[in-house]
Amino acid sequence: MEWNQIKYEASALNAEAMNPSNLEQNINVPLIESLVQVIRSLSPAEQALLEEKLWTSVPELSTLELMKLTEQGGAFDFWHDEPDLYTLEDGEPIES
């Protein structure tokens, strides 16, 4: 699957899930509460094994995917509004 397709689908799913009108329809609260209760009843070793199983099924992003996510995510957009503090004329040239 292409990165853009993954990003689009994740964005669409997140937007749909977070839509206030869909929250009540999409969340099975009793199921979630039961799962939390079961997880809390597990021994620390069982919880660690469960955590390991859950996280190993999530693929890590490649460097390129992480760069695209960072670039397109908007978290650093505020830098576009920052003034340029330095120019090529600032400082002294480095001599080797």
Image (tube, helix red, strand yellow):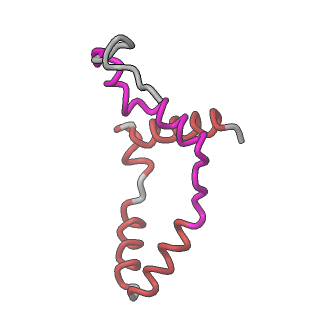
Residue extending farthest front: 96
- The percent position of residue 30, horizontal first and vertical second, equals 37, 66
Q: Which quarter of the picture shows residue 37?
A: bottom left
Q: Which quarter of the picture shows residue 73?
A: top left
Q: State the extent of the magenta-drawn residues as a range.
A: 56-84
Frontmost residue, 94 versus 23: 94
Position of 45 relative to 31 (above/below): below
In the picture, measured across the screen, residue 14 lies left or right of residue 7, that is left
Position of 50 relative to 5 (above/below): below
| Quadrant position of the N terminus in the picture | top right
- Specify whether residue 41 is painted magenta: no
- The percent position of residue 36, horizontal first and vertical second, equals 37, 72
Frontmost residue, 68 versus 5: 68
Q: How many numbered marks does the figure carry?
A: 0
Q: Which quarter of the picture shows residue 79?
A: top left
- The percent position of residue 91, horizontal first and vertical second, equals 31, 19
Residue extending farthest top: 89
- The percent position of residue 88, horizontal first and vertical second, equals 39, 13
Frontmost residue, 17 versus 55: 55
Position of 41 relative to 57 (above/below): below
Q: What residue is drawn where x is 40% and y is 29%?
A: 74
Q: What residue is drawn where x is 45% and y is 80%?
A: 48
Q: What residue is drawn where x is 39% and y is 20%?
A: 93
Q: What residue is drawn where x is 34% and y is 20%?
A: 92
Frontmost residue, 70 versus 16: 70
In the picture, measured across the screen, residue 1 lies left or right of residue 25, that is right
